[in-house]
C-alpha cells in the first residue's frame, strides 16, 4: 500500500490551527471552572443536587478508598521495613508510613481513585445529555446547565474528596500498623505513638489542601469533557477516556508543584 | 412568575395586537466549520400566527429555532423575539426570555433520568414558587391535554416515540408560553401518530392562540394545519369549511441553499411557479 493511500483518510491540520484549538479549549475550560465557583454565590443554588451528588461521589467511592488506602499503607510499611531493618531502625516505620500517607500517597491515591470513578461518570453523563439535546432542552427551559449540573458536582467533589482523603489516610495508617505489628513485630503502641509524634501542622496542611485542589480538578475536567462531547456515542466514549486521562495527569503534575510551593512557604528544604 | 392554571376550555388572553410581529429575523447568516447554513435570511412571525419552515435535510431549519431561542448566535443579522433583541442579549438574560417560549425538540430531548411527571413539571419546579399539589394538578391537566395522564410515573425509556413527542409537547406548554417552536414534531412517526401530534398543535394554536414556528420536511403536516381547525365541541380537529382558509393564520417559508425562496400562505404556495418549490410540494 502506498503512503499516499495510507494518508488519504487522515485529515491533516496545520500546527497553527492545532495550537489555536488547544488554546481555545484551555480558555473554555477556565471559563467553565470560574463559572462553576461563581455560581455558588448566585441564586438559585441547587442544594438538593449538591447533596445527591455528594452521596453518589462520596458514599459511592467509600469502599474503593478504604480498600486502596489500607493496601497502600500496608505496602508502604512492607517496602520500608526491609530498608529500615538493614539500618536497625525498624522503630521509625510508623513515622515513615505517617508522613508518606498523609502528605503524599493518601491524597494522590484517593484523587486517582475518585478521578477514575467520577470524572468518567461526569463526562459520560453530561456527554450523553449533550448528544441527546438534553442540555439544549435545559437551556431552552430557562435553566442554566452550569448551575444545575456543573456547580453541584464541583462543590460536592471538593467537599467529599477532603473527607475521603482523611478516611484514606486513616486506613493507610491502619494498614501500615497491621503489617508492622503482625509481620515485623513492631509494638502497636510504639507504632501509633511515633506516628502521632511525627505529624506536624505542615504535613497535615499539605495533606488536606491537596484533596481540595484535586476535587476541583477532577470535577471541572470531568464536566468540561462531558459538556464538550461531540459525535454521538463514540464521542461520549472518547470524552470519558479523555476526562480520566487528563484529570489523572493534571493531579500528578499539580501535586508536585503544590508540594514544592508548600515546602517553600513553610521554609522546609 | 407563576402562570395561571388553565384548562382546555379556557383560552389564554394574549396581549398585543394580532398583527404585531412576535419573531423577526433580519438578514441572519450563520456558518458551521466554513459551510454557510443560513445566508441572510429574513422573515417575520405575526402574533397568534403559525409559520411552517420547509427545506431539505441540512437546510438550516432546526438552526433557525435554536437561533430564535438564543441557543446559537448568528454570524450576522438581527433576531427579535417578543420585542427583545436576542442577538444582543447575554446568556443570563436569555434564560428569562426562554421561560416565555416553549420548544419541542426533534428527538423530544426528555430528561431520561426523570419521570414523565418531573419532565413535564421541570419548569414549574425550577420556578420554585408553586406547591407540590399545584404542580401535580397542572401536570395532570397538561398530560390530559395530550391524552397521556396515565404515564405520570413512567420513565421516558418506557414510552413509545409518539408518546415521548406528546410528553415533550406537554412540557413545552405547561407554562402556556407565548411562542411554541416545533422541531420536526412528526419526524420518524407513523401516519396515525403524526396526525395525533398535528391535532395537538392545531389544538394549541386554536384554543390558546399560541404563536408557533414549525420546522418540518413533511409538507402534508403543514397543509393539514392550514386546512383544519380545532372544534372544541367535538374535541377533534375538523376540516375548514370551503372558502374559510384565510381565517387560519398559517404561512410557509421554504429554504434553499441557506436562503428564503418562498414566504407566503398556502394559497400562494400552491400557485407558485418556482420549479424547485413545485418539485418539492409535488
Image (cartoon, helix red, strand yellow):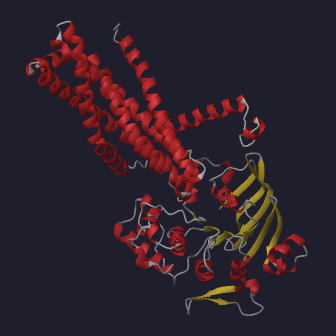
Does residue A199 show up?
A: no
Quick check: B263 above or below B73? Answer: below
Image quadrant assignment for residue A95: top left
Coordinates of residue A154 in the picture (x, y in percent): 41, 40
Image quadrant assignment for residue B220: bottom right
Quick check: A237 above or below B51? Answer: above
Could you say which is closer to the camera, residue B49 or residue A4?
A4
Quick check: B68 above or below B117? Answer: above
Q: Which residue is situated farthest in the front direction here? A: A1
Q: Residue at x 72, y 39 (%)?
A: A6
Quick check: A130 above or below B155? Answer: above
Q: Residue at x 37, y 51 (%)?
A: A49
Q: Is residue B70 left or right of residue A245?
A: right
Q: Is residue A269 left or right of residue A137?
A: left
Could you say which is closer to the camera, residue B171 or residue B162?
B162
Q: Is residue A239 left or right of residue A183?
A: right
Q: How many marks?
A: 0
Does residue A81 show up?
A: yes
Coordinates of residue B195 in the picture (x, y in percent): 62, 82
Coordinates of residue A86 in the picture (x, y in percent): 21, 8
Could you say which is closer to the camera, residue A168 or residue B128?
A168
Q: Look at the image and tell me in which quarter the C terminus of chain A lies.
A: top left
Image quadrant assignment for residue B114: bottom left
Could you say which is closer to the camera, residue A241 or residue B132?
A241
Q: Look at the image and tell me in which quarter the N terminus of chain A lies.
A: top right
Coordinates of residue B55 in the picture (x, y in percent): 76, 66
Amino acid at each position: 500500500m502506498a503512503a499516499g493511500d495510507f494518508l488519504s483518510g487522515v485529515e491533516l491540520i496545520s500546527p497553527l490551527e492545532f495550537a489555536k484549538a488547544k488554546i481555545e479549549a484551555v480558555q473554555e475550560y477556565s471559563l467553565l471552572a470560574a463559572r462553576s465557583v461563581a455560581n455558588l454565590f448566585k441564586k438559585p443554588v441547587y442544594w438538593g443536587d449538591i447533596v445527591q451528588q455528594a452521596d453518589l461521589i462520596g458514599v459511592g467511592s467509600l469502599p474503593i478508598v478504604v480498600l486502596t488506602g489500607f493496601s497502600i499503607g500496608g505496602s508502604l510499611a512492607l517496602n520500608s521495613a526491609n530498608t529500615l531493618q538493614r539500618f536497625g531502625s525498624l522503630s521509625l516505620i510508623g513515622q515513615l508510613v505517617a508522613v508518606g500517607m498523609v502528605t503524599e500517597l493518601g491524597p494522590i491515591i484517593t484523587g486517582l481513585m475518585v478521578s477514575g470513578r467520577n470524572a468518567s461518570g461526569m463526562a459520560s453523563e453530561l456527554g450523553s445529555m449533550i448528544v441527546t439535546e438534553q442540555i439544549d432542552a435545559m437551556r431552552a427551559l430557562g435553566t442554566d446547565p452550569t448551575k444545575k449540573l456543573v456547580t453541584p458536582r464541583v462543590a460536592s467533589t471538593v467537599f467529599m474528596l477532603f473527607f475521603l482523603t482523611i478516611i484514606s489516610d486513616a486506613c493507610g495508617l491502619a494498614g501500615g500498623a497491621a503489617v508492622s505489628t503482625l509481620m515485623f513485630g513492631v509494638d502497636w503502641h510504639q507504632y501509633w505513638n511515633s506516628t502521632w509524634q511525627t505529624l506536624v501542622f505542615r504535613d497535615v496542611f499539605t495533606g488536606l489542601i491537596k484533596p481540595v485542589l484535586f476535587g476541583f480538578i477532577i470535577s471541572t475536567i470531568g464536566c468540561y469533557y462531558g459538556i464538550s462531547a461531540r459525535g454521538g456515542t463514540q464521542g461520549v466514549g472518547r470524552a470519558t477516556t479523555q476526562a480520566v486521562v487528563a484529570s489523572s495527569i493534571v493531579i500528578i503534575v499539580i501535586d508536585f508543584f503544590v508540594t514544592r510551593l508548600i515546602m517553600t512557604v513553610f521554609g522546609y528544604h | 412568575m407563576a402562570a395561571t392554571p388553565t384548562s382546555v376550555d379556557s383560552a389564554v388572553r394574549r396581549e398585543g395586537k394580532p398583527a404585531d410581529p412576535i419573531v423577526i429575523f433580519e438578514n441572519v447568516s450563520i456558518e458551521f466549520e466554513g459551510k454557510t447554513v443560513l445566508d441572510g435570511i429574513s422573515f417575520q412571525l405575526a402574533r397568534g400566527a403559525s409559520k411552517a419552515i420547509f427545506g431539505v435535510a441540512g437546510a438550516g431549519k432546526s438552526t433557525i429555532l435554536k437561533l430564535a431561542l438564543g441557543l446559537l448566535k448568528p454570524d450576522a443579522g438581527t433576531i427579535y423575539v417578543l420585542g427583545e433583541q436576542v442577538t444582543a442579549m447575554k446568556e443570563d438574560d436569555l434564560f428569562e426570555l426562554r421561560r416565555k417560549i416553549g420548544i419541542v425538540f426533534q428527538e423530544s430531548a426528555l430528561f431520561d433520568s426523570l419521570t414523565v411527571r418531573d419532565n413535564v413539571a421541570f419548569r414549574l419546579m425550577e420556578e420554585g414558587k408553586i406547591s407540590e399539589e399545584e404542580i401535580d394538578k397542572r401536570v395532570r391537566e397538561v398530560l390530559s391535554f395530550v391524552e397521556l395522564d396515565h404515564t405520570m410515573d413512567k420513565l421516558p425509556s418506557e414510552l413509545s416515540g409518539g408518546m415521548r413527542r406528546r410528553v415533550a409537547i406537554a412540557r413545552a406548554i405547561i407554562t402556556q408560553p407565548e411562542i411554541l417552536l416545533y422541531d420536526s414534531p412528526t419526524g420518524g412517526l407513523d401516519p396515525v401518530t403524526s396526525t395525533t401530534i398535528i391535532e395537538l398543535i392545531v389544538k394549541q394554536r386554536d384554543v390558546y392562540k399560541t404563536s408557533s414556528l414549525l420546522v418540518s420536511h413533511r409538507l402534508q403536516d403543514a397543509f393539514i394545519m392550514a386546512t383544519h381547525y380545532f372544534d372544541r365541541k367535538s374535541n377533534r380537529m375538523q376540516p375548514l369549511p370551503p372558502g374559510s382558509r384565510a381565517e387560519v393564520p398559517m404561512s410557509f417559508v421554504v429554504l434553499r441553499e441557506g436562503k428564503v425562496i418562498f414566504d407566503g400562505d398556502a394559497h400562494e404556495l400552491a400557485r407558485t411557479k418556482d420549479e424547485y418549490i413545485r418539485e418539492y410540494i409535488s
